[in-house]
Image (cartoon, rainbow, N blue to C red):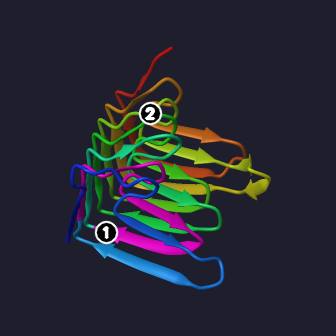
Amino acid sequence: INFIQPPLVAPEIGGIFGTDPESDITVTVTNTSFTDNEAKGGGALFNRFGEVTISGSRFTENRGIGSGAGGIVNADASQLSVTDTVFIDNTAIQAGGAIKNFGSLSIVDSEFTGNSAYSGGAIYNYSGMVKAVEHTATILLSDSTLRENSATRGGGLANYGYDGFNGSGTIQERKSVG
């Protein structure tokens, strides 16, 4: 499956959107490309209150406008698992060039290259209060590479709030400016 945004811009959410606090939403994405999507939420995917598993996929040149992430927003009490997936040249105006996380995030055997944002060029992880809601974001980063991502704060990874980061892998040639 390929999610390629036509010249029209999705006003709120890009390729896939899931939200319903009353039901158990489970989405599995395998061998899928998200290219050139743009939205105020997640340029390619917005997950809220759900469980999303992504494997063998590609997120390329997706854009987050407003407060959205370029590739994926993992919001509220959501779970996102990413394995063997590539994020290339995704951008966000504010935070999370590739991924913006407020929930539980696991990344294994994946690569982030050339992503950019003001904060968290590749990944933005935030725990704390947002719109009067307490978020406890966690991130596990294993056997993954973050290279040539850029941001004013945290070229490869910006981790704000509680100590919810556990990782191994490579962060190289990260660029933070300003």
Answer few, some or many: residues within 10 Å of disc 1's Cα (few below 14, many 20 plus, some between 14 and 19): some
Q: Residue 127: which disc?
A: none
**Left or right: 134 as drawn, with respect to 150:** right
| Chief SS of the magenta region | strand
Q: Residue furthest bottom?
A: 23
Please give the range of residues in magenta. Answer: 33-55
Q: Which residue is mark 2?
A: 117
Tell me which corner region of the image, top left, top right, bottom left or bottom right, holds residue 149. Answer: top left
User: Dot 2: what SS?
Assistant: loop
Q: Find residue 75 and report its horizontal and vertical position in percent.
A: 58, 60
Q: Find residue 113 and report its horizontal and vertical position in percent.
A: 29, 40
- Depth order, front residue of 11/74: 11
User: Dot 1: what SS?
Assistant: strand
Q: Is residue 130 placed above or below 177 in the rendered structure?
A: below
Q: Which residue is mark 1?
A: 55
**Left or right: 85 as drawn, with respect to 77:** left
Q: Residue at x 60, y 50 (%)?
A: 165
Tell me which corner region of the image, top left, top right, bottom left or bottom right, holds residue 81. Answer: bottom left
Q: Is residue 51 magenta?
A: yes
Of the residues shown, which amino acid type is indicated by label 2?
Ala
Q: Residue at x 50, y 65 (%)?
A: 47
Tell me which corner region of the image, top left, top right, bottom left or bottom right, holds residue 116. Answer: top left
Of the residues shown, which amino acid type is indicated by label 1?
Ser
